[in-house]
Structure formats: C-alpha cells, structure tokens
Amino acid sequence: MAISFSIKFLAFLTLSFLVCLVHGVQDTSGLSGNFYDKNCPGLQGFVRSIMDDYINKKNDKRMGASILRLFFHDAFVNGCDGGPLLDVDMLGQTEKTAGPNDQSLRGFDAIDAIKTKVESSCPKKIAPNQGAVSCADILVLAARESVNLLGGPTWDVLLGRKDTRLSDPTSANNNLPGPGSTLSQLFAKFDSQNLNVDEMTALSGAHTIGEGQCMFFRDRIYTDKNINSSFADMRQETCPDTQGVGDSNLAPLDNQTTTIFDNKYYDDLVLQKGLFHSDQELYNSTSTDSDSQKLLEQTQKKVIAYRDNGDLFASDFAKAMVKLANLRRPKTALFGEVRLDCKKINPSLF
C-alpha cells in the first residue's frame, strides 16, 4: 500500500508540474469576486485607501504607473502569482534581477504596506501558517485602484490566487516585451499570452501614465526615423547619446497628460511622439514584411479609434485587464501558497 501510494503521489506531482508548464491558459477555477468576504471583508477598501495615500496624499503619481507595470511583469510570467515580489525563491532565484526588471521595477513598498494592513486586520487565515490574502491578489487589486485613482476605468476582479514558491527569471527574460520591440516581436509576446491584436493595442495604453528611463529610449530619439524631430530634440536634452551617461534620467511616457489615465497616449502616437520604439510601432511600424503590414493595419485602426474615443479605450482596456489577470498557471500545494510576507516564501511545507 505504501509503495502504491508513493507511486500515485509522485505521478500526481508530475502531472501537476506538467499542467503548470502551460502558458497563457485562462483558468478562473477557484476564483470568485467574494473569495475573501468572510475572512477579510475590508480587503478592497484597504487596498484603495493605501494606494490613495501614495498617489494623492504623498503625491507620488508615478506610484500608480509603477504598480501597473509591476502587475504586467507578474502576469506575463506564468500568470499572476506574485513572482516578481520575491527577493529569493525556494531555489535561490529571483525575477527582480531579470533583464526587464533589474533596477527598474518599483512599488514594492506600497504592496508591503497593503500586506501589513491586511495581515493585521484580517487575522483569520485561509490555512495554518498561511497569510490572510495572497500577494498576487493584492497586486491585481492595487493595479486596478491605481488606474482608477489616476482617472481611468474600474472593473470587477476575481480573487483567490495563490502565491508561487518558484520565481522564474528565465521566463521574465523571455516573455516580457521590450521597449525596442518591432511590431511583430511585440505581438508575438502578447500572442503567447493568448492576447489578440486589439487587446495588445488597448493594454499598450497603460503607457498613458508613468515615465521611462533614458537607457530604454535612447536609440529611438537618436536613430529612429518615425519620430517627430522637435520631440526627439526635446528628449535629447535630458538623455545624452553616450551609453552610461544619464541612463536613469526619466521622461514621461505620455507627452501630454503624464499623470492622468486617459487616451492622449494614442494622440502622441499619431503625432509620432511615442517615447519607446515599441510604442510608435503600433502606428508607424518600421517593418516592411507582409505580416507586419497586416498587423499594422489593425493596430493603426485601433490607435485612431482610441484617440478619437476615450470611453472606447477605457472599456477595452478594462476588459483586457480582466483577461490578463486571469491568465495563470494553476498552483498545486507544492508550488502555491498564501505568503505571510510578500518578499519571502513561507517556511517549508514538507
């Protein structure tokens, strides 16, 4: 019996691990809008209050964009599982030092503040030695509140995610779209997450808030042809042509309304004032192959539609955020938990 049980248990773990290798699967099983209603009824109010403290009372408007970016970098790597929040995982890895994240992700202090409030206010744990609310769910809620507090839409959020015990820097390096991406490269990253062209164009509108570092747009302002010359000259004033000089100097992603979540980002693209090469590719792709041109026809139409209709953009963005939040790997007991501290995995389960 013991041998039979062991074989079955190992087979179960193997199957669970193989299931967890599936990317881009929309799996809402076990999630619900009222998941925490009994053990943490004040959760959503806590999240909004603390994000409001950062964005409005502390006047850190950039924090909203930072949380939204943190959410994207979580969702695109194995789904929303709190991976980039870990300082180190059970194997000694971290996503924080992956190329797209190193020295650029921020917002961890806001997530930690929410977690502290939740753990002190909601003492009833879901299971022994587990936290009250997963860090993955906290980040999903914080992203929604950040958008809404900066003037954008809101949407219903399903809850009940588990936090991963395994960080994945390799997937972070491979899955996240870079600021120098061509249109085809950009779409390939979104397509791998089961997101279509329209959803990619809507989600790119997240760049209506926040700032980018000089190192990520230097090539664009000095070498790209599909750029407004006056805009390039202005950005060159604070972003020197020399690599290593002024790399962390910031410029707004939205040239018009930097701290307001609206549709002006798309107006910038039509004016050839997108900050990143990948942004401008949505409207003036430099690729000439037939596949890129077909993609460009679709993205151009959406860029114009969103520029002309802010309500349409807000609605489509909200729908795409719901879908993105629900693209996840199902977590088994071995790989999923509800962390006590968002920076650390819980003590070993075995």
Image (cartoon, rainbow, N blue to C red):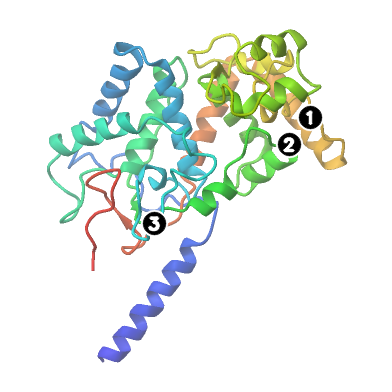
Vertical comparison of 49 with 135: above or below: above
Q: Where is residue 45 in the image (x, y as percent from the top left)?
A: 25, 26
Q: Where is residue 47 in the image (x, y as percent from the top left)?
A: 28, 28
In the picture of the structure, the residue carrying the numbered disc 1 is: 285
3D distance between C-alphas at marks 3 and 1: 37 Å
Examine the image and state in which quarter residue 229 appears. top right
Q: Are marks 2 and 1 in contact (CB under 8 Å)?
A: yes
3D distance between C-alphas at marks 2 and 1: 7 Å
Q: What type is the residue that disc 3 sits on? A: Leu
Vertical comparison of 27 with 251: above or below: below
Q: Are marks 3 and 1 in contact (CB under 8 Å)?
A: no
In the picture of the structure, the residue carrying the numbered disc 3 is: 166
3D distance between C-alphas at marks 3 and 2: 31 Å
State the mark number for residue 182.
Answer: 2
Q: Earlier in the sequence, mark 3 or mark 2?
A: 3
Q: Which of marks 2 and 1 is nearer the N terminus?
A: 2
